[in-house]
Image (cartoon, coloured by chain):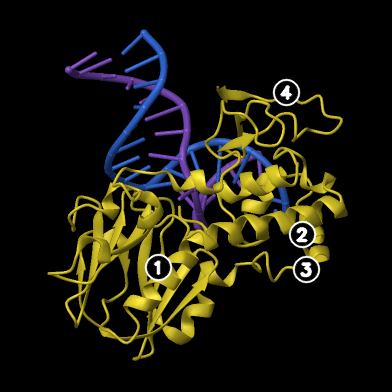
Chain colours: A yellow, B blue, C purple
Amino acid sequence: MPELPEVETIRRGLNKYIVHKKIIRTEVLCDKSFIGEPATGVVKTLRRFGKALVIDLDNSLSLMIHLRMTGQLIFDPGPGDKPDSRFAAGHPSDSFTDKLPNKQTRVILEFDDGGHLFFNDQRKFGFIKVLPTNEVGNDPFIKKLAKEPWQMKEGEFYEKLKKHQNSCVKATILDQSVICGLGNIYADEALFMSKIHPERKSGSITKKEASLLLKSAREVMDKSISSGGSTMHTYVKADGTKGDYLELFANVFRRNGKPCPRCGTEIQKIRVAGRGTHICPKCQQLKGGSKSQRKVDS
DNA sequence: CTAGGATCCTGTCAGC
DNA sequence: TGCTGACAGGATCCTA
């Protein structure tokens, strides 16, 4: 999915489009994608908790949205508007520019000014959930979230790694109750930046390395947020051809077979904690380890 | 309690 | 071409 920078991009983008507008109708095309009773009301604020987006209405109800792997939110200002007046962000796909609704549209929110917010989600793992605003903090997902990298103290992060000493460090930093906001892309990028092999046991990470890893996580996500995460603008280039927004900042993610930007060694793809994982085998080494690295492909 | 694997679902791509 | 299996920017549930 959309990881923290993507959701933050969506929050900032939608902030310009839907605040003070009234949701007048909800169309649910897939029951699984919508939890609770559809709500009408004026949008007051947009909040983000880790990778979850919360839309607060003026009637004490909130919509909590989690995009999971393939969710995307696309706001269309309405008929008569130019196609590029659309705001789209989340999982990059052709749906950003498709005629909507399309096959992957799960929920449509209609606003009083004729605008529509489309919730698309190929794999149906994501959802929109209606709950009382004062219950948002008690939602099981939000309740278990740890601090974000910017709020986390270095010592605190180090102690958390120690607590999961037998897990691979990549698995540990993907755990939202350890540190919140990292997903598969930014985990790989942050580990590469800190020169830490993803299969290192969390308990073997030194204080210095933990500090570097935390700083790297902040840096990688800051950079992505400032470049707009995966939005329609970065997905469709000025000439109309498709572009991969990963090109903008990724050093290892999906760059297997290409040279490491730091040392030129070929980037490898391996499997760690059940997830595809990208490393530079020279920059990121298993210290003193005889453990073999399983190669997935070139 | 932790750690690892299966699972939800649809689509795409590599390999035969 | 058609089939098959692997895999995917996430999180939860189940097992040991």
Real-space CA distance between mark 2 and mark 3, rounded to the nearest whole angstrom: 11 Å
Instruction: Tell me the kind of residue under disc 3.
Output: Lys
Are callouts 2 and 1 both on one chain?
yes
Image position of A238 (left or right of A280): left
Q: Earlier in the sequence, mark 1 or mark 3?
A: 1
In this picture, is A263 found above or below A110? above
What residue would you read off at disc 4? A292
Q: Nearer the viewer, residue A87 or A272?
A: A87
Query: How packed is label 3: few (under 14 Cα within 10 Å), some, or many (20 or more)?
Result: few
Picture coordinates of residue A264 (x, y %)?
A: 68, 28
Sequence-first disc among 3 and 4: 3
Q: Residue at x 22, y 72 (%)?
A: A77
Write down the chain letter for disc 4. A
Residue at 80% over, 63% down: A154
For mark 2, name the chain: A
Q: What residue sits right under mark 1 in the picture?
A: A65
Q: Are marks 3 and 4 in contact (CB under 8 Å)?
A: no
Q: What element does badge 3 sit on?
A: loop
Q: Residue furthest left?
A: A80
Confirm whether residue A90 shows in the render.
no
Q: Are marks 3 and 4 on the same chain?
A: yes
Return the disc, 2 or 3, that comes first in the chain's sequence. Answer: 3
How far apart are the two marked residues, 1 and 3, measured between alpha carbons? 28 Å
| Residue A40 picture location, percent across and down | 25, 83
Could you tell me which chain the residue with mark 1 belongs to?
A
> In the displayed structure, would residue A226 be above or below residue A273?
below
Q: CA distance from mark 3 to mark 4?
A: 33 Å
Same subunit, tags 2 and 4: yes
Q: Circle 2 is placed at which residue position?
A: A160
Marks 1 and 4, Cα distance to the nearest angstrom? 40 Å
